[in-house]
Image (cartoon, rainbow, N blue to C red):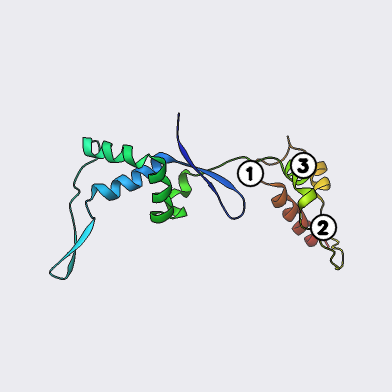
Amino acid sequence: MARFLRVTMPDSTVWDIPAEVIAENRTKYYSAGRGKSYKDGKLVWQEPSFKLGSKEWNDEFEQSMEEYELTDWAANNMDWKDVKASAVRVPQKSNATLYDDAWPNAEKRVVKHEPSKLAITLEELSYLFPAQQRPKDKTMEQLRKALEVEREEQQ
């Protein structure tokens, strides 16, 4: 069964990163020995101490697939750009379910402002874009914003 590092981002989106991507990044680093060193005050890159497919490579890769190594290496030695191409967004509960669960304890406060003439409710969106007709690459929030822009242009 395939292994993934599941990451929850600050915007609450959840992503699965294939463990092999992280393990390969770590193994490449360690296959190069210490990578670089200084000789006579000049930066010198060292030759790899073991090659792809060798027993040493496979042993290092196997160690890199351990949970601690995956999480530690990803957090301390990689950036989002290093994993973005292979990251897969994990579908989450529908907003309706999340909202129903969160409603009793959600932060609530009274505010005053002019009602927006352009505001589109989720109910309106659901009517305009039933789930089976909704563009698969668009969230309800993206559709709401697009419709607001369209309404604004028509006025």
Viewer-side residue, 95 vs 147: 95
Asked if residue 3 lies left or right of residue 93, the reply is left
Q: Residue furthest bottom?
A: 41
> Dot 2 corresponds to which residue?
119
Residue at x-position 78% and y-position 44%: 100
76 or 28: nearer the viewer: 76
Q: Which residue is mark 1?
A: 137
Name which quarter of the figure residue 40 lies in: bottom left
- Residue 95, image x and y in percent? 73, 44
Q: Is residue 82 visible?
A: yes
Q: CA distance from mark 2 to mark 1?
A: 22 Å
* Closer-to-camera residue (34/24): 34
Circles 2 and 1: CB distance less than 8 Å? no
- Could you tell me how far apart the alpha carbons at marks 3 and 1 are, in whole angstroms? 13 Å
Disc 1 marks a residue whose amino acid type is Asp
Amino acid at dot 2: Ala
In the rendered image, the vertical position of residue 13 relative to residue 20, given as above or below: below
Q: Which mark is residue 38?
A: none
Q: Earlier in the sequence, mark 3 or mark 1?
A: 3
Report the front residue among 84 and 36.
36
Per the image, the residue denoted by label 3 is 129
- Residue 86 location in percent, x, y? 46, 43
- The answer to whether one can see residue 54 in this image is no
Callout 1: few (<14), some (14-19), or many (20+) C-alpha neighbours within 10 Å? Answer: few
Secondary structure type for disc 3? loop
Q: Residue at position x 48%, y 49% from top?
A: 84
Report x, y in % for residue 144.
75, 52
Residue at left offset 81%, top offset 53%: 120
